[in-house]
Amino acid sequence: MFCLLLFCLCEVLLHIASGTPVPLPPYDLKRISVFENATIGTVLDIVVFVGVHDQIQLVLNGSQEDRIFGFSVVNVTAANVVLTKNLNREIKDYYLVRWSYQDKGQREIPYIMKSTQVYVLDVNDNPPAFTEYPPDEKVQAVENVAVGTKLFEVSAQDPDQDLGGAVVYHLDPKNADYFAGNIVDGNRFAVSLKKQFDYQEKSIHEVNITAEDGGGVEGYEPRHHTSIQIYVEVIDVPNKPPTFLHLPYTVDMYEHLPPGTELMQVAAMDQDTGQPLPLLFSLTASQPRPDLLHRFMIDRETGVVSIVDEIDRESLLDVDGRLNLEVTVTKDAEEAEWRLNATTVIYIHVLDINDNRPGFDSGVYNGSVLENSPYAIPVTIDFPEGGIYVHDYDAFENGTFEVTIVGDGGLFYLQPGIVQNEANVLIRVKDSSKLDYEKLSVISFDIIAKETKTREQLSSRAQVTIYVEDTNDNFPKFASGFYKASVVENALFGDFVTQINASDVDSGDGGIINYYLVGSGKENFDMDEVSGVITVARGSHLDRETISKYYLTVEAKDNLGAGNRNSTQLEIDVLDYNDNVPVFQSELYESFLIENDNVPPEFRRTFVVKASSSDLPPSSDISYFIIDGDHQKNFSIDQNSGQITAATPIDYEKMDVNSTDSDYLRYFNLTVMAMSRGLHALNSTTTVIIFVEDSNDNAPEFEQQLYVGVVEENASAHTVVLQVAAADKDSTPFNGHIQYRIAHGGGDKFVITDEGVVLVGPFANLDPDQTNPRADAYNLTVMAYDDGTPRRDGKTIVHITVTDVNNKSPFFVKNIYDARVVENTDIGTVIAKTLASDSDENHELQYQILSYDEGRDEFHVLQQASAYDSWFSIDPSDGSLYVNGSADRESVEMIRLTIQVEDVNASDSSKPQIDTAQVYITITDTNDNTPEFQPPYTAETPYYLIKLREQVPTGTLLMTIRAVDRDKGENGKVHFDILSSNNSGVDLVGVDRTSGELRVKSPIDYDCEGCQWINFTVIAYDHGSPALNSSAPFYIEVEDMNDNTPVFTNLPVNKSVQVWENATLGTEVYHILAMDLDHGVYGKVGFFIDKENQEKFNVTNPNSGRVVVNGDLDREAVSNYRLWVQATDNYLDPFGERKESSEFLDIEILDVNDNAPVFSSSSLLFRVKESAAVGTLVGTVVATDADDPQSNNSKIVYYTVDGNGSDFFHIPNAESGDIRTQSSMIGLYGLYELVVIAKDLGEPSLASNFSVTIELVDENINAPVFLEPAPGALARIHELDPINTEIEELYARDEGDRGLNSEVRYRMGEDIHNDDYMFFGIRYDEETQKGYLYLAKQLKPRDGQNGKKYYKFDVIAYDLGEPGEPQKEAVFHVIVYVVSKNAKEPKFSRPHDEPAKVFEILEHTESPWKLGYLPPASYEDPEIDDPVCYYVAGGDPTKRFKVDITHSDDILFVQTNELDREEVQFYDVVVKAHNCVNSTLDTRLHYEAADLTQLLVHIQVLDINDQPPVFVNTIEEFDKEIINGTSVNYKDYVSGITVTSKVGSIVSEQVKVSNN
């Protein structure tokens, strides 16, 4: 530096001594640096001169490209250096500006020459650019490629420097599910698979990658980014099974369909839609009848299912006519691993046809009945089943029939009277007053079974004989039909309960009464048979909490207990005794507290323990106490409510660790006792666990307040500098977990890990020379944070010193050099001087040409490097670029090459210190090429030949002459001239000198002498110096032309002719003539018809002119034709010149009667109301006749001839076609047909018939009727159910009307006084024709503000009504009960091992019959007051029992269907309680004693004498010889005697038994 100052000082002194001005240091502008974003006008520097005599004159020299600044004079001794051009460092980062100055006062002294180096500094003004990525930005990957596989790489570059050129990559978060990215090979971004592909889920993935630079120095400049989208196409593999379409498959088929009938077609698809495989179908199972699989088949390719053998529905009665066919579809793959399959089920319902008539099991029946038998008492039938068995196994209406009595005089009725399929019909007494043995002992009548709902109405008949029996007819009588008593639940054996008596007016044994108890619970009581006194039985199990009431039946039987009987009801109340310990709702209670060492902490929510007793108050009132685990008295409990609260502050850190699982779990273990308050107080205990949570009350603390570290300036990313450490006294995972952050001073130079390790940042540049401002040391503020709430922190200082290394590379002062050289310049000529610099002290620079990057000709076409790589070379020591060979511009005009400079004295030889620059060499032109004529001028045909017709217009373009000169600029410009002509061709044609267009200058006549050929020469010359030229001969041949047009000579008057529409082919229509004044082929005329009419007309020969019929004519289709006739000369030459004339010829088609009337529609449907009066217009039929409307051929008359509507409708006016009513139609409906005839009046006459359909329209007179739900039904919904939850089915029918009058829809009934309806909506289902009430608006919490327990509103069913008909509607009042979110299943209060509840009932008791009462179920939480619902959940497949709720909320068990002891002697029925929420109830449950929602009910069916004796020995069959020797087979009870039999011998012994 000192030497440089000394040199500058010496130079100034020298100039002053010589009298010349000199700029002062440092203002001599040796070197200037400027940022590339500096604006024009920016002052770069100031130059000051000394020794100035007058004003300084400043002048810019050198190349125009380098003149980037100018001078702005400040005064006579100073000038500002001002930027005059926009800069771009990435294009050019170095300029050498040459300039000179002169003192105007000393003009004798020449200009002083100076040069200034301008270095352009970088700013971050370029975004990264992707340079490497998959072709077309697409990649492919097979669907099952392994997770972790690399799919593709991308790379981006940024021409900016430092942080501005450092590129980082970001993967779009939307791609994070499937893809992951990481840096490979320094600056490449690799994308790999993170989640397995699924082709069907997504076949193309759009992966978005963003490349972002680091911003400018210290991040003060904005960051730039660029994104690229790579499409990943997933290639499908056949790894998914096929799937069936259009599920479910259901088909209804009639029985006895013939083999081959197609039932349906199943369809499937390969889920691998990218590579679908063929699919094969098969039938694999038939359930529940595997034996019927062979009755069906499936086409393995099409999936069509058809019948192989007939199916009889009645053979499938055991499965209700239903079959499930299992279908399997398999992928037809060559590899076994891809032969995947799927199965589904076709649900087949075999429908019935009426192929069975009602039948009896016998044609004759005998029976008996006691006289005076009361109404409904069944008659005893002498048959094994005890009744009359009737059957018709057809389905639904085909199997529905009625059973009636004929000829009994009104004595009896049948039950049931209507039978579906089969029944055991009982004959019951209808009029007991006529059953008098003394008046009528034998009754005979017939029973008829007849179908009522079928068209065939098949029937059968049986004969019945009834014998009336004599009997005693007085029964015991009770004073009351209902008795009530009570007993305390701890009563002892023998304690009196009550006494009940009855009386009987009969005398003798018939008046002596015995008493019996019947019903569930009777085992707990004894009843004296004689006195009727009831006492507590030995071993009784009276428990009020299990059963609080007993409902028993007391029976009184006369005749010492063997005669008539009567019964009454007895209700016994069980009174309470304190015998139940309190029961906690949970065996374990848990809650949480957050420590607070200042005041007692509070639980997150109210903490209450709850116990209950099933006894009645006061025995069920409970007190609560903490009896163990609270040694420090930290907690208290409310004795009445059971609420637990903290009584003292609690410090988490002072608590013991009392769990082996975790050091962080600390809790109190309390024992709480519940004690009843009544007499004989009882108690129980439960465990209470209270967990205590830590609060964040300690901050992290560092081990040191200052950390010191050292790092080299070229340290790589992630180099470890040092590690800091902090500790937190809190011990829980969040409060004690520490994270580290650099709060200040790190910038992008340093980062810190979660473990406190300080690392060099991923994009850090620690070189002090490249840091602005320069920095060789850093002070970091490091923070430690815990994860607690609120978060606490601590801090420390980290001091880092950066040490220096020698790591500078040389650099070219310019990135791009331009050079120009004239082609064929001498070898050795220097064309450019390149220059590099190195800030290291001991550097040695060597230059070389690194590569020839590209060479292009003047058309920018790339040329092979071998064509020009020997033309130039570079001096390795000073970087001079010079000519080394002969350059040819026409081969290559622009060359781009890369040069390299290397510091061969680099300290680390393994890491070369190099830089590169690019040189653009432009080769300029010399005139060394002559013009060349272009095709059709060639070396083989060195001339031009042109054919030209005479009389072409002046100015006609003959051709454009083209000649090319390979030189450039003026050297390559070509002009044209005509040199000579043998026949004044110069006068006939001319050429444009610039464009080369050859045109006709004057008219050319073929007939002039010597005008058949025109010959001349054209010269082409360039504008070089000297000019170069070439020439070419031209030959023009002149051709003759046709110039006369044909003329028509005999067109008819008005150019119109006529022909009949039935004219035959070839009939002549007209003969046309024409002439042409030309001769030869140009005078020969041909005639042609336009193509549009050639299908119907043509000429027989082109030269004849005879127009004939060429196709069938139909006046009704086309009545007039306009033919265009064309006369053409030279018509035999398809490619020759022609002239033509055209004229039209109109042809009128004359009519014949060849069309019958045609009705205006293919079908007509008229509608008329059933109440229409006689003569009402129903509709009009219209027919048209296409024949001539001016003749009788098209006149039409109408009349009717047939149809089932001819009695009601007719056409009174034959000409109008109006159909009118002719009789009353009240009560009629449906469709009626009427055949109408339309006939024309032509000769011969033609006619057509037409069927009209007339619909008698029903009138809307009936309103819909709600069938579902039942009146008063309560709908239910859970208060947390979401919107669209279905609540109730609505079903209404309009039976009396038809069509739209009977189609029912539903809507909400609006009420301005009640907005309950606004929470609900109705969704209509076309298939079921039902409305579905659903939740349309979220309900408010039932117990919250404005919450409701019930919602009441109306729904309306209305018919659609035919257009014009008034709609009818019905209103249904809906109540929706809202089930609490706390609702649980109610439970019965019974022990797990409690025996079944027992009821007894006489067989054939008329239903419904109240069997007794059941104990109620309840919710464990007494605060829940939701209703309880009950249903029969098992043990009752024939639906003979139900559970009813009485008005007093008693649970009543009811018999709903008649019972027969001989059929079933007892029933074990499961009754289930539920919270009324379930919409589907399982009725096939088995009793589970542990499930307290279930109750077992045992029903014992008691016998009555309703069965006659039945012989039990089998029919004996044997042969007996008769006198004539024949053998007779008797199928009956047969006995015989011999001639030697003795008197008194047993002939036959038969045994009869009774089912009673």
Image (tube, rainbow, N blue to C red):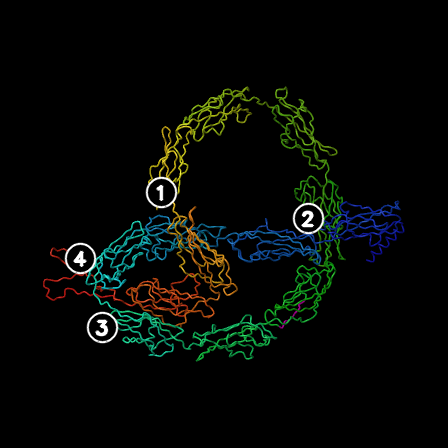
Near-viewer residue (1175 or 1096): 1175
Dividing the picture into quadrants, the one containing residue 292 is bottom left
Three-letter amino acid code of the residue under disc 1:
Tyr
| Label annotation for residue 851 | 2
Dividing the picture into quadrants, the one containing residue 579 is bottom left
Tell me the crowding category of disc 2: few under 14, some 14 to 19, or many 20 or more residues within 10 angstroms, Cα based. Answer: some
Tell me the SS state at disc 2: strand
**Depth-wise, is mark 2 or mark 3 nearer the camera?**
3
Q: CA distance from mark 4 to mark 3?
A: 52 Å
Q: CA distance from mark 2 to mark 1?
A: 100 Å
Residue receiving disc 1: 1232
Tell me the crowding category of disc 1: few under 14, some 14 to 19, or many 20 or more residues within 10 angstroms, Cα based. Answer: some
**Depth-wise, is mark 4 or mark 2 nearer the camera?**
4
Above-or-below relation of 1468 to 1125:
below
Three-letter amino acid code of the residue under disc 2:
Ser
Residue 289 is situated, as x and y percent measured from the top left of the image, at: 34, 57
The region drawn magenta spans 722-729
Residue 528 is situated, as x and y percent measured from the top left of the image, at: 29, 76
Reading the chain from its start, which is encountered first: label 4 or label 3?
A: 3
Tell me the SS state at disc 4: strand
Q: CA distance from mark 4 to mark 2?
A: 125 Å
Three-letter amino acid code of the residue under disc 4:
Asn
Above-or-below relation of 804 to 1003:
below
Residue receiving disc 4: 1529
**Depth-wise, is mark 1 or mark 4 nearer the camera?**
1
Near-viewer residue (876 or 1069): 1069
Above-or-below relation of 931 to 109:
above
Residue receiving disc 3: 509
Q: Is residue 1091 left or right of residue 973?
A: left
